């Protein structure tokens, strides 16, 4: 199944953090596309450093809830702490879509509920998959024209 994962870092060696996360993800699913890194201003939360953001596309045979669990474990191994909501972080891994799945559970909402509002997700995603769509929302390129 096609999985799209957004990656962000704004603490420490941001580029190394992203590279390390991609390497860890590649151990559990097949990464097929990886965007370049985009430097972006933080959205929400306290005053904090700029982010580096990227998006990857992978083929996954892991169920979406299990994939999310694995992503959270990778974040922890790479030093992610959750002290301040939308605060700075060494690494942030968000499962954006998983095929055409629509899930609304306590621990996982797919498609990601704010992906269509976030240029730092949409621009790198459009770079590697210009025809991409967010299920039930629309084509990424059309969404980018509206935000």
Image: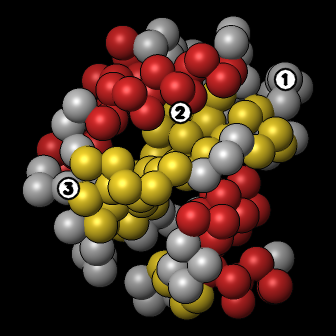
Where does the image place residue 77, in percent across and percent down from the top left?
36, 12
User: At 51% from the left edge and 65% from the top edge, which residue is drawn?
Assistant: 113
Query: Which residue is denoted by mark 1 in the rendering?
Result: 49
Image coordinates for residue 82, horizontal then vertical, percent: 51, 20
Q: Is residue 78 left or right of residue 140?
A: left
Q: Which dot, 2 or 3, sits closer to the camera?
A: 3
> Residue lying furthest front in this view?
32
Q: Nearer the viewer, mark 3 or mark 1?
A: 3
Mark closest to the chain's N terminus, 2 or 3? 3
Task: Give the answer, above or below, for where 2 lies relative to 20.
Answer: below
Residue visible at 70% across and 41% down? Answer: 37
User: Who's the residue at 56% across and 20% down the image?
Assistant: 17
Give the class, few, some or many, for how many residues have Cα within 10 Å of label 2's Cα (few <14, many ≥20). Answer: many
Disc 2: which residue: 92
Mark 3: few, some, or many residues within 10 Å (few <14, many ≥20)?
A: some
| Quarter assignment of residue 127 | bottom right
Q: Nearer the viewer, residue 102 or 78?
A: 78
The residue singled out by tag 3 in the image is 60
Residue 88 visible within the image = no
Q: Which quadrant is the N terminus positioned in?
A: bottom left
Q: CA distance from mark 3 to mark 1?
A: 32 Å
Where, quadrant-wise, is the C terminus in this rendering?
A: bottom right
Res 51 seen here: yes
Q: Between disc 3 and disc 1, whose residue precedes? A: 1
**Which percent across, then down, holds residue 86?**
66, 34
- 1 or 2: tag closer to the N-terminus: 1
SS for callout 3: loop
Badge 1 marks a residue whose secondary structure is loop
């Amino acid at each position: 199944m096609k999985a799209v994962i957004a990656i962000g870092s704004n603490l420490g060696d941001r580029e190394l953090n992203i590279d390390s996360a991609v390497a860890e993800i590649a151990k559990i699913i097949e990464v097929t596309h990886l965007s370049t890194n985009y430097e972006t201003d933080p959205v929400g939360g306290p005053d904090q450093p700029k982010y580096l953001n990227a998006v990857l596309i992978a083929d996954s045979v892991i169920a979406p809830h299990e994939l999310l669990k694995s992503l959270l474990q990778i974040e922890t191994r790479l030093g992610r702490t959750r002290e301040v909501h939308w605060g700075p972080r060494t690494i942030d891994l968000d499962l954006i879509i998983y095929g055409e799945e629509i899930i609304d559970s306590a621990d996982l909402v797919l498609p990601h509920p704010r992906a269509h509002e976030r240029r730092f997700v949409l621009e790198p995603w459009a770079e590697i998959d210009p025809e991409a769509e967010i299920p039930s929302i629309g084509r990424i390129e059309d969404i980018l024209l509206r935000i």
